[in-house]
Amino acid sequence: MSDALNPCMTCGACCAYFRVSFYWAEADDASGVVPVDLTEPLGLLMRNMRGTNAREPRCVALQGEVGGCVSCGIYQQRPSPCSEFAMSGEDGVLNEACDRARARYGLPALFHPSLPSMTESYGIAGASPPAEHVQSPG
């Protein structure tokens, strides 16, 4: 990623839209790294981040205001659903879940395949260049 500001640092919508559920052993009272005191049981083998199973979800680890300046209080210890969740446009791939969460908070979509230059301005690796920059074979 380039030096451009990562849109996730001014978003946080996914942390306040989805339930973050994961296998219980990801918590630090088992073999994992997620602080157990920030989780709650979801079933026999599953846990979720506290706050994300609420009617209006918000992860307890989310710091800041959605759409403002945000960060994850346990970024290095976050569960797999968080580390695997891709920002829309990352590697040139649309993530409708990201855009849906952003829309809930009145934030614009980050990427649309017909507008690849949106991600180019963020320096996202793998994003396609605008059509006028694509050379035809020959």
Image (cartoon, rainbow, N blue to C red):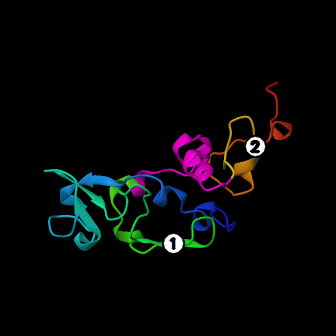
| CA distance for labels 1 and 2 | 29 Å
Q: Quadrant of the C terminus?
A: top right
How far from the left and from the top, in percent, is residue 130?
Answer: 80, 41
**Residue 87 covered by magenta stretch:** yes
How far from the left and from the top, in percent, is residue 116?
Answer: 73, 42
Question: Which numbered disc covers residue 54?
Answer: none
Residue interval drawn in magenta: 82-107
Check the image and report above or below for 43 versus 65.
Answer: above
How far from the left and from the top, in percent, is residue 133?
Answer: 83, 41
- Label 1 crowding class (10 Å Cα cut-off): few <14, some 14-19, many 20+? some
Of 21 and 126, the residue lying toward us: 21
- Label 2 crowding class (10 Å Cα cut-off): few <14, some 14-19, many 20+? some
Of 80 and 120, the residue lying toward us: 80
Quarter of image, res 106: bottom right
Please tell me whether mark 1 sits on a helix, a strand or a loop. Answer: strand
Q: Quadrant of the N terminus?
A: bottom right
Residue at the spot of label 2: 129
Q: Residue furthest top?
A: 138
Which residue does the image show at 32% across and 65% down from the upper left?
Answer: 50
Of 16 and 83, the residue lying toward us: 16
Name the kind of residue labelled 1 in the image: Ser
Residue at the spot of label 1: 71
Which residue does the image show at 62% across and 42% down from the upper left?
Answer: 92
Q: Residue furthest right?
A: 132
- Tally of numbered discs: 2
Name the kind of residue labelled 2 in the image: Pro
How far from the left and from the top, in percent, is residue 9?
Answer: 59, 67
Of 136 and 66, the residue lying toward us: 66
**Residue 116 covered by magenta stretch:** no
Check the image and report above or below for 5 versus 135.
Answer: below
Please tell me whether mark 2 sits on a helix, a strand or a loop. Answer: loop
Horizontal arrangement in the rendering, residue 122 relative to residue 83 (left or right): right
